[in-house]
Amino acid sequence: MAKTNGRKNGAGHQVAMVFDLNKCIGCQTCSVACKVLWTREEGADYQWWCTVNTQPGRGHPRDYEAMGGGYREGVPQPGRRPTREEWGGGWDFNYDEVLYGGKGQSVFLHPVGEEPKWGPNWDEDQGAGEYPNAYFFYMPRLCNHCTKPVCVEACPRGAMYKREEDGIVLRDESRCRGYQFCLEACPYKKVYFNFVRQVSQQCIMCFPRLEQNVAPACVRQCPGRAVWFGTLDDEEGPVAKLVRKWEVALPLHPEYGTEPNVFYIPPIGPARLNDDLSFDEETPRIPDEYLEGLFGPRVHSALQTLKAEMAKTRDGGKSELMDTLIAYWWRDMFKPYDRDPAEIQWT
Amino acid sequence: MRAVKLQLATRTLLNPAAQQWAKVPAEEMTLGGTPLHQQPSRYVRTAWAGKPLGAVRLLKVQAAHNSKDIAFRLEWADPTENRDHGDGSVFPDAAGVLFPLNGDAPLESMGSADAPVIAWYWRASMADEDDAQELIARGAGSAEQAPKSLSQARARWLEGRWEVVFARPLEANGNGARLAAGKPAKVAFAVWEGSSQERAGIKSFSKRWQELEIQ
């Protein structure tokens, strides 16, 4: 049953993303592609709907994993809203002084006002572990467009909804009155309050692009071929294969109970070094327990599958999974959303 | 309660600090928290279970008109002046004056499908030159801005007390609550204490409609 042409999009589907954390190089091109497209208006200065953080790390907003929200046994859990300081970012810089004030040689560029204490990528490359076995990896995060979006349920005004045709979670800003129950309830803290307009805002999965068969900006701009995009019911597509067939793509914090539709290939990391600097192939450099804390117990079988398929190709065998992960053909990573946005007259 | 007739410019009525308000009879109203089971979000009902609702328990209300405009002056104690969302951990203080658009509208549930209510809504983040919002609701969580707001609000916070005056033309040409001298009406009041996380349906309110007599 080949469905290579006209892969499904449209009524009753769920769009999804898979990030390969073995391939993400933390370049923030996704973050910046999103930033320039969606969050340049007043009050959005500190908003980064897509962020890439170093793991292990405290994340963005700082320590968001300890702020509650989500579902436990189907019941929405109380959460708290991050403070502006816990978000960080949105700083003003002394551009005038350095660039136009004649002090370019004597004054360095720095944020003005209160000294920043946190930001969207504050603990970059710190990671964990001890030399020579230190480790870290990068993890892009955006709204998970959950199958059970607790933000939608939390809103007392019915201002949020999950789109029938593609499962995108959206907010009707004309109904939003800035009460932020959505932000409290979201366990991933991927809702941003616009302090100027007094409405909440978040990733819209680039729905105006999707409607023109153009992949989201974060996906299309990734220079590392580290992210796939498609609908979960397109069985022949790479997203469904990675999530459903091979079961190597996992949601972040499945225990939060909202069933995210952004998935991650867990990172394998390089081999550990023994004291004599020989390779220790037995002990993973990135501790399994740490990955289990992020992706749940299914991470063990996902890692086993990845390692087994890698071994297969190393021995000269063929692996559909490895071919998919290598992503020989860039456009295949997000078909049928592979239309060139430059061809379109955007209004 | 009674809206007394005064020969005063609307500008004076709208000034919460105007000395003339001192002569207007005041009513001390006991407020209560909105019932949690009426909150239209399961998240809100879960997150607020066991927490006190309705931080402000006493409201002083005065009402007056000058034949052209009617004004309500609300005054309550609030040691924290929340004019904005601060660092994200608070909400701006707010107040509302509510009228039934149909005599039988239920108050606790903010009206119903066939018996809407209309609120004049002031939020401490509003600029003085902004009009107050007029919100029409047909049940909890359904409030929408009326096509046109005829209401204004002016406020000051002084020594731990908010003083807020709402005013609107008596003759509203069918926009909003019908208010006229000599015609009995119903009114209710609500206050949101921003530093206690109050917003939306989480508020103090006057629990029942007050009979309003317009002199």
Image: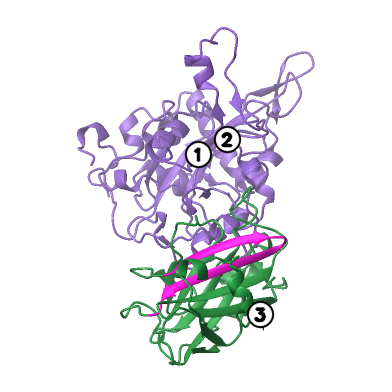
Chain colours: A purple, B green
Q: Residue furthest right?
A: A275
Give the SS element for disc 3. loop
Alpha-carbon span between mark 1 and mark 2? 9 Å
Circle 3 is placed at which residue position? B31
Give the SS element for disc 1. loop
Residue nearest the viewer, comparing A74 with B67: B67
Q: Kindly identify the residue that appears in the image at 53 percent across and 39 percent down.
A: A46
Residue B40 visible in the picture? no
Residue A328 placed where, x, y %? 36, 27
Q: Quadrant of residue B73?
A: bottom right
Q: Is residue A166 above or below residue B46?
A: above
Residue nearest the viewer, comparing A287 with A107: A107
Q: Residues within 10 Å of mark 2 (few under 14, many from 20)?
A: many
Alpha-carbon span between mark 1 and mark 3? 41 Å
Tell me: A214 left or right of B26: left
Q: Residue furthest front?
A: B7
Q: Is residue A13 above or below residue A347?
A: below
Q: Kindly identify the residue that appears in the image at 55 percent across and 22 percent down.
A: A94
Circle 2 is placed at which residue position? A89
Alpha-carbon span between mark 3 and mark 2? 41 Å
Label at residue A228: none
Could you tell me the amino acid type at mark 2?
Answer: Gly
Q: Residues within 10 Å of mark 1 (few under 14, many from 20)?
A: many
Which mark is first along the chain, 2 or 1? 1
Could you tell me the amino acid type at mark 1?
Answer: Trp
Q: How many marks?
A: 3
Q: Which residues are magenta?
A: B151-170
Whether residues under marks 1 and 2 lie with C-beta atoms below 8 angstroms apart, the answer is: yes
